Image (cartoon, rainbow, N blue to C red):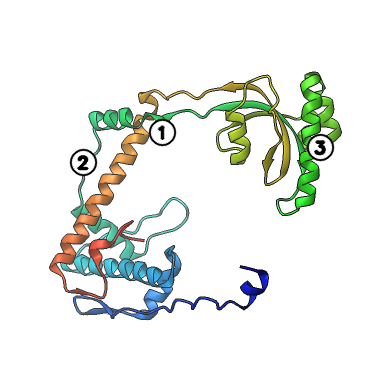
Amino acid sequence: MSTLQSAVAPRPARRRFTRPEPVSVNGVIIPSAAIARETQHHQASDPDQAWMLAARALAIRELLSQEVERLSIVAEPLDDGEGRRETPQEARLRALIEREVVVPSADEDACRRYYDANGRRFRSPDLFEAAHILFVAAPDDLDARDKAREAATALIADLVQDPAGFAAAAAAHSACPSSKQGGNLGQVSTGQTVPEFETALRGMVPGLVHPAPVETRYGLHVVRLDRRIDGEVLPFDLVRDCIADYLDEVVRRRAQQQYVSILAGRAQVSGVDLAAARGPLVQ
């Protein structure tokens, strides 16, 4: 489509937000204004989804609040360790869940099975000792990118003939502060640099310069890999507690969702499907 065509082409109609039927739990209506305020706490792809997530959250809170009253739950508010104290109602809701949703802790066998099936998750990061020379060029400046690519390509050809000249070339040409250290970046681990740079490092042979300029959002890089240290799978004993915490949380959330489903099955709920609810019960 030409520029002119795109300028006059009709824009797609904006999707209109339609509110569903009123939300209520055992005859108690959740005000629309309260749901609207709650939407800010829920990430969603569109207003309808945000509204429904907020409605579920408030309906669950109302359902649990009614159960708190039915069971005459009493609890003392606690501090969260960050200077915030629970409200009296938050304390009662917490006490209800602690009393009614009791789950076993993950045992050694369960932790071991998870470790054996997910060993790659418990691997130390790969380490790279590398140096680079940066020719700065913004992604949207095509002329600057072309000039940077040309300069980087020419420099790579020179360094193939004279590898020992890398530090001097970095001092002369690199726009990175590492130029003062001969372009040396020290140790770089997984996730510490941009994906394009990391991908280039993973495909390199230690001691050599990458055969072509590496393009990133910052510009064009001449890259040398000095050393690579592959990560290793961490021993079970070192990650056992982390695995147990994770498994306990998974089981706890599943049990909480089941508890809400049981309460919802005994209640008169309209305007929202609590069976589809996910996430923490008390927010």
Tell me which amino acid carries mark 2: Pro
Q: Secondary structure at mark 2?
A: loop
> Which residue in the structure is indicated by mark 3?
151
For the residues labelled 3 and 1, say whether their Cβ atoms are less than 8 Å apart.
no
Residue 93 image-quadrant placement: bottom left
- Residue toward you, 102 or 89: 102
Q: Residue at x 78, y 35 (%)?
A: 152
- Residue 168: % across, % down: 84, 26
- Residue 173: % across, % down: 84, 35
Q: Secondary structure at mark 1?
A: helix
- Residue toward you, 117 or 197: 197
Residue 10 image-quadrant placement: bottom right
Q: Residue furthest right?
A: 172
Of the numbered discs 3 and 1, the one sitting upstream in the chain is 1
Is the residue 42 above or below the residue 234 in the image? below
Q: Is residue 198 left or right of residue 224?
A: left
Q: Residue at x 30, y 67 (%)?
A: 56
- Mark 2 Cα-neighbour bin, 10 Å: few <14, some 14–19, many ≥20: few
Residue 57: give its label: none
Is the residue 154 above or below the residue 138 in the image? above
- Residue 64: % across, % down: 24, 65
From mark 2 to mark 1, how far is it between C-alphas?
Answer: 24 Å
> Which residue in the structure is indicated by mark 2?
104
Tell me which amino acid carries mark 3: Ala
- Residue 8: % across, % down: 62, 78
Is the residue 2 above or below the residue 242 in the image? below
